[in-house]
Structures are given as C-alpha cells and as structure tokens.
Image: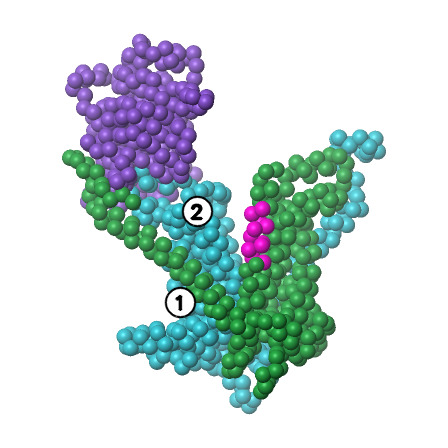
Amino acid sequence: MSTTIEPTVRVETTRRQPMPPRERLETIFHVEGLDALYSGKAAIKDVTIDVYKNLVTAIIGPSGCGKSTFIRCFNRMNDLIPGFSQTGTIRYHGQDICASNIDPVAVRRNIGMVFQRPNPFPKSIYDNVAWGCRVLGMKDGLDERVERALTQAALWDEVKDRLKASGLSLSGGQQQRLCIARAIAVEPDVVLMDEPAASLDPIATQAIEQLMHELKSEYTFVIVTHNMQQAARVADMTAFFSISRGEEGKRFGELIEYDATEKIFTAPSDKRTEDYVTGRFG
Amino acid sequence: MTTLDLNEATRRPFTGRRVRFGDVALQVVAGTAALAVTVLVGLIVWKVVDGARLSIATYGLHFVWRVAWNPVVGREVYGAGSFLFGTAITSLFALALATPLALGIALFLSELAPRGLRAPVTALVETLAAIPSVVIGLWGILVLGPALRTHIEGWLHSVFGFIPLFGDPSAAGASIFTAIIVLTIMILPIVSSISRELFLGVPHELKEGALALGTTRWEMVRGVVFPYARGGIAAALILGLGRAMGEAIAVTQVIGGGVFIHWSLFGQGDTLASKIASSYQGSTTNLSTSSLVYLGLILLVFSLLANVTAQWIVRRVARRHGVTRGGHA
Amino acid sequence: MSAQGLSGPGLRLDRLPRRRAVNRLMELLAWLAAAIAIAILGIVVYSVARKGWSELNLNLITKAPIPFSLTNAPQGLANAFAGSLVIVGLATAMALPVGILVAVYLNEFAPAAVRNGVGLILDVLNGVPAIVVGIFVFGLLVVGHGQNGFDGAFALACLMLPLVARATMEVLALVPNSLREASLGLGIPQWRTTLSIVLPQTVGGIVTGTVLAVARVAGETAPLLFTSSLVGTQTSWDPHHALQSIPVAIFELSESPDPADHARAWAAALVLLMFILFASLAGRWLATRSRAKMATR
C-alpha cells in the first residue's frame, strides 16, 4: 500500500572536490595498535590509522577482512556482542574511547551509525527522526529539527506530506535515507556507515553518495564499502584492509594501505592493494 | 503418487491413488478424536447452560448484577452481583500488581541478566507456576494471611485508613487483600514468561539502531522494545487476567467468604469461582445448585472472552510483524 | 560499569548524568523484580518443607485417616495417595491416546482450515477454568449416578488433553517432510508411514508433554471436588466409587481448625510439591534433550 516516489535522477556522477592539503587536515580519530577479538580469536590486528575531520574516509577490502568489526569499534557497538574484546586505543578528542571507564552511551551520542540494512523504527516517519532528539534532550523546535534532518537526507520533499505514515511504508532507499536523517538529527560529530547502499538500487545508492558529499562540511563520514567504484566516487581517503595469515594458519584482517583515494586507485604502494583494486582478487 | 515404487508400478495406474483401507481407517479414527474434542467443548458449554437453566428461568439477566445470596429455604434469593464485584476487584488488583513485576522480570531475563543466570532464573520463575493452587492456598491461609494481617494490614489501616480501601484489618488474615496477593503470585509466571519471549523476539537491528543514537538501555527498551512488543504484552495481560478470574481453590481458601460488597480490601468476600467451590457441596436445593452453575456460566463466558481476545491479538500482531520467530537479545 | 563520559569542546553530553541515573534505577528495579519472584518461590517452598518435614513419615502413606481422632493413634493419608495414583493414572490413560490421535489428525491429514479451527478449540479447552470443568463433568456423569474415580479421571483428562495434543503437534511438525516422502516413495502406505516412521520420532516430545501434563493435573483440586470427593477413610484402589486424592485431602485439611490436621496437610503438600517439581524438572530436561537431538538431525 506504500506509494513510493523515487528521487529525481541526477544524471551526472558525483564529482569529488579535491582534498585540502595534508597539513590543514585535522585528525579526529587516532587509532593505535587496535586488535579486535571474538571469543579470543583475532578479527583484526594491529591497526594504526588517523581519520581526518570533515572528510569521507572509505574502508575497502575483501569480505571477511574485518571492515565491519573495525568500524564498529568507533562507536563501541561491538560491546553488544558477547565474547568480544579489544586492545589498543582509539583517541577521540584526546580520550581513548576504548577505555573501560568511558561510557559507550556518551561515545554513541557523538558518533552515529547507519547500518547495512535499513532499520527504521516501527514508528511514524516524523517520530523516527524526532524520537532520538526527544530522548537525548533536544526537545526545542522539534518540527524544525525533523525538517532539517530530512532535508539534509534528501528525503523531505518525498515525505513532507505524510510525516505521520509509518516509517516502514517507505521503499528501501527511502528507509535508508530515513535512517540517515535519524542519525544526523541528533547532530553527531561523526557518521559511521556500514555498507549503507548494500541493499539498495543504483539510483538510491547515488542519492546517498550525493548526501555524503554535501554534508561532509558538517560531519565526518567513515564508510565501509565492498564496492570499489563507490569508494572511488565518494571517498577522500581510502583504507584498504585485507586478510592475512598468521602463525598456525589463523586468518585475521589488517590494514594494508591508507592514503588519498586517488593514490590508492591509481598508484598503490602495496602489491596487495594493487591486486585488489585491479580486480585480480577479492 | 509415487513414482519410485517398483513393486506397484505395474499394478498401479499412473494417475490417482488407490484408496487403502489402512489410510482410511487411520484417518477416520484420528478424525473422530478431533471431532470428539470439538464435541467435548460444545458439551461443556451446553451442560453449563443446561445446569443454569433453572436459575436463568427464575431470575433472567438480573441475576448478573443482583447483590444477594440467601440459600435459606423459604427466603431463597440468588444473585451474582457481589461475586462479580469480588472477581473484578481481586483479578484487576492482582493484574495491577503482577504487571510491573512480570515486565521487570522479563526485562531482566532478556536484557540485563548475565548469560549464566538466564537459564536458571527462567527455570525458577516457571517453577513458581508449577506450584499447585491448593498448596499456595494452604500457605496463604496458614502463613501469608496471618503475616499480612500482623504486619501490613494494621499498618496500612493506621496510615491510610481514611481511604475506604483500607478498612479494619481482617480477623485472621482471610481477606480480599490476601486473595489479591495470592492471585498476583499465581499469574506472575504466565505474564512474565510470555513477555520474556516477546522481548527476546524484538529484532536485533531495531535495538542496535536505537542504541547507536546514543540512548541508554532503558531508553531503548522504552522506545523500541515496549512499543514493538505492545500487542503481545496486551495478550499476556489478558491471559493473566483470565487465569486470575478462573482460580477457585486458592482464592476460596484465603478469601473468607461473604456476600456483601464493601470497599475495604481487608474485608471478606467471594469471587465467582471461589463461591462455586465453597458452596457446591453444601447446596441443598435445585435452585441453589442451578444458581451456582449460573455463576459458572458467567465465569465461563468471561474466560472464553479473555481467551479469544488474547488469541485474536496474537494473530493480529503476528500478521503485522510478518511472523518473525526467534531473535536473540 | 563505566562512570566517565567523554569531555571536549563541541561534544554533546547534555543531561547524560540524569539519564544514566534513570537507567541505573530501572536496571535495579528489574533486578529487584527477579529477586522478588525468586524470594516468593523460596519462601513458599521453605514454608512447605519446614512445616511438612516433621510430619513426613511412612505413616502418611500407609495409614488411613482417623477423622475427629482424640487419641494420638498413628494416622495418615493412605487413601489419598492411593486414590491420586489411580485417578491420575486413569486420566493419563484417557488423555494420551486421544491427544496423540488429535495431533496426528491435525498435523498429517487435516486441511489448513480444520487445523486452525480445531487448534482454536484446543486453546479454548485449555482456557476453561478447572472449576467449570468440574461443574461440567458433574452435570454430565455424576448427576444421578453418584461420584466415582472414573468421573474424576475424566475431568482431569479434559484438562490434560490440550497439553498432550499441543506437545504432540509440535513434535510432529518437527519431523522433516523428507522423511515422510522417503517412506511414501518406497511404497509404504500413509497409515504405516505415520505409525511406524513418523510417530516413533516424536516419542521424546510426547513423553515430555505427558510428564508436564501430569505435573499440571496432579495438583488439581477443583474438578475432583465435584467428581470424587465424598469418600470414606479406607484405602481403596477401585475407581468405581469415589476415591480420595491428595489435593482434595490438602484442601479439606486446610479448612479444618485442628492444628494436627494442618500438620498433615503440610506433609501431604510437601510430597505433592516434591512430585510436581520433580516431574516439571524432568519434563523440562527431557524437552531440552529431545530438542537437542532434533537439532542434530
């Protein structure tokens, strides 16, 4: 019974603006020696990386290399998985957010997440966006907040007449944009995206990529994607993870190379990176 | 039907099935059993209506709200009013007390408890349900009632006595109040175990989506788990209510017996079920027996209503959620 | 857990301490609720154990009751124990075959509409209060003929039937269709397939369901009040007349003003409780075991 209207198609592909020079980049996450383990088995090992503010950083790599695990370390979502443990540090605003005395609730308040499959709440479209604001104490001007978030998520025009309709009545692409609106309505610092367009068609995917492009002046985006072309289109910096084999043949993921997207795709330093981006494996 | 059967292939035609006596016989016998169950339920309804017939003919619908019960021959008059009131008060108060406890237990078992505690505590709560009502009643009349009377009723009366609910404490602990506590204990396990299943069934992604916004666990529960499980919880509450209404033995042991309607929880009274249990064996006239069955009929109607309503809610909720089974916290 | 939030310019941390406190409070309340439930269980079981223990001796099972006894002659509830065994045994014998047959019909033969319809009826039967079942059996069988053990057993069977049927239906549904198809494909007729191939797979689940149903009705009092409660004191195993049962005996003793009667009631309650707890735990253990076996198929 849902009447879904897809966004007007923009034919030209997203053109990334050139990144500011390295000296002017501000580090927002300083990751050092991060290991993540599920029930004692290492998923990723010894990751050291600096994520920069107001850029789009892509995490690419073959399946099973720990990309999702890695990104979920940033907002302590792995805490929800029984048997998970980690060592190493992630410095955010000078504090190690992996430390046990840091409240994950505070971390997640500032570092939002959009998931692989859209997961809107079984509430109205308006409430999907407004609920977070209400609970987190941003009760003033709710209507404006909702409109702003939905506009930034490029969804406002399609839903402005039916804000009371259930969030579940939207199409997949619209639901994912609703989830993005929900995440940015609470004004986080960083938005983590775990393969946000994995279940979407190309037009919906393009809408989301456009979004990131327009919003990165306000937020920092870290996006996991298995789609190299998407990374090439949308990311300023790209981190390539791959699966390595350790002693006793145990597999784990590790960061192979991290650089400006152009360099990763045109002149990678590591052979493994080159093999991956040229399609020789993965 | 079979194509691999080499022995029969030559004899059996390709289309259609040869009807076997064994198949028919099993189907008939099993079908008769199913029919018998249907007939049984119909019989129950019919027999109860039939037993109440005399009283229905005598009093009609007025019976339902008349407050009177006098079995003395020559001055016989019967009515369900005070027992309906007793059933309502005891069941509703019990539900009110049991609901927050049950939801708390369900939340504990689905969200908060350390993994190692979940199975044993779940088993313990369900063991509470296994205690027979006569044993709870025995405990109620000999232990709980006197304890409530000594420690709680007196205090409540002295502090809140201006509220008509808290009148003079009961003589020996047999009171509506004790019955309410007993019923609370009895319906707690049902409501809590259904709620627990419901909470465990909330999709993991919804909970993650809420937590990722930076909400606390309680805020997530209030904003996502409760609304998602809302329908099922309603069904659980109605089932609990039905159970409370139908409980005869434990209630009759602790409630004290009486035909008056009064506001004090510490007074005596009777519910539909407890009145039947206490008076059936001493019933001397046909009219009194028939009136007791009439009480049973009213009780049956309410029980069936509660049951059917709960089922209907469950079916509606299942349809809306696409019948997703499973899911873990 | 953690106490510190983050701190830093531009970070959103509004009202976090208060929200954390509310969260803490709710967690505590949930813990409290669970503790209350366990405490209640503990108190009840402890009361029964402590008060019943002293009177718990062989006399309870072997000696007959002596009502209005003014001496200290040994007495017990032998008639109730015997009667309960007979009545519950008969009830199981009545409910088990019918329950299994109903489940077989619904799961193997019935079209969906019939399955839903009769399933609904089973749920309705399950929801009929035990006391109404008592009235029903009284009107159906006792009126004009007097009470007897068979009537009591029949009343309990009505309560057991939905439980056995549902449990059997659940395990029947777990048997993979490929098994049925393989058997039919070999030329084995459906009736034989059902009885020799499918049903044996479900024995574990049926036993579990029956054990749990027995645990449920072993303590039922209300139906027996109407059908098998006017009894003498001699121990009898003959269901052709009314037999005493443990729950009814406890009920009657609990209403008596005599503390000696109360003591015997506690002892009988202890035995009944132990039996039911044992049966419930056994049932649950069997259930997890057969579920594990099914899962490895």
Residue C25 percent coordinates (x, y): 29, 53
Task: Identify the colour of chain A in the image.
Answer: purple
For label 1, the SS is helix
Q: Quadrant of the N terminus of chain B?
A: top right
Q: Quadrant of the C terminus of chain B?
A: top left
Residue A68 versus residue C141 in the image, above or below: above
**Mark 1 packing: few (<14 Cα in 10 Å), some, or many (20+)?**
some
Name the chain letter of the residue that bears numbered label 2: B
- Disc number placed over residue B116 in the picture, else none: 2
Residue A72, quarter of picture: top left
Q: Residue at x 67, y 57 (%)?
A: C96
Q: Which residue is mark 1?
A: B93
Q: Which residues are magenta?
A: C279-289
Task: Identify the colour of chain B in the image.
Answer: cyan
Q: Which is in the foreground here, disc 2 or disc 1?
A: 2
- Disc number placed over residue C151 in the picture, else none: none
